Image (cartoon, helix red, strand yellow):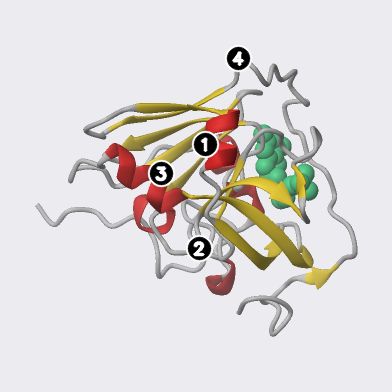
Amino acid sequence: METGKSLPRGQKVVKRFIYYAALGVPEIDEERYRLTVSGLVEKPQEYSYQELMRMIDVNYVRDFHCVTGWSVLGVSWEGVSLRNLLQRSVPKKEAKWVMFYSLDGYTTAVPLEDAMSEDAVVVLKMNGKPLTREQGFPARPFIPYLYAWKSAKWLASVELLPDYVDGYWEERGYHERGNVWEEERFKGQGGKHLPRRPLL
Ligand SMILES: Nc1nc2c(c(=O)[nH]1)N[C@H]1C(S)=C(S)[C@@H](COP(=O)(O)O)O[C@H]1N2
Ligand SMILES: [Mo]
């Protein structure tokens, strides 16, 4: 499942990324940029770009799957483990979902469980170089087994929430979780990973 060993159903390999910017490419001021971690955490934090660069602790090769059906194989990703970043802020036990907010106004949600998975990363570099402006400089989250719309470019804030809330594409019918191996493209598809509701 790491790279190229198998392709999720409904995907085709392409050589190059197709750049998307549903809300346009924002202006970035590297000096003023901060990534914040807030919401249901004991210790809200903010990090400058330089701080994040010094915290890089993940460097791996993984494939990238867009829900429209294209996949780029064998991409190298470097960044800060999202689990480590979240643990520094000490998530409260009521926290169940994570909302990513971008500088362009884009948003997307993932289950806290997936944000805390071993491979979840706040990417700062792709293929050995800092993210380009088109590809989300300074930072974007990446969880390899979720569709790429969950990888919010120009990431500015990570907020822990008690309940599921739609992001940009989720509001337009895309799936709450978006697991590529379960083919969770649209709400109501896949089915195994729908938000769990408390029994009472
Ligand atoms: N801020 C922002 N992030 C975004 C998007 C976007 O339009 N705006 N598009 C998403 C989608 S649908 C995909 S497939 C990937 C595309 O990444 P790329 O532009 O690096 O190819 O970014 C995701 N992150
Ligand atoms: Mo996408």
Name of the residue lying farthest toward the right:
15
Choose top left, top right, bottom left or bottom right for residue 106.
top right
Question: Disc 3 versus disc 1: distance between alpha carbons?
Answer: 22 Å
Residue located beneath label 2 in the image: 119
Which image quarter is the N terminus in?
A: bottom right
Q: How many marks?
A: 4
Question: Disc 1 versus disc 4: distance between alpha carbons?
Answer: 25 Å
In contact (CB < 8 Å): disc 4 and disc 3: no
Q: Is residue 163 above or below residue 30?
A: below
Instruction: Name the residue located 85 percent from the left edge and 49 percent from the top edge.
Output: 18
Residue located beneath label 3 in the image: 85
Foreground disc of the pair 3, 1: 3
On the picture, is 134 further left or further right than 92? right
Question: What kind of element bears circle 3?
Answer: helix
Instruction: Name the residue located 45 percent from the left edge and 49 percent from the top edge.
Output: 82
In contact (CB < 8 Å): disc 4 and disc 2: no
Q: Which label is found at residue 32? A: 4
Question: Disc 4 versus disc 3: distance between alpha carbons?
Answer: 20 Å
Residue located beneath label 1 in the image: 167
Of the four image quadrants, the one with ligand 1 is top right
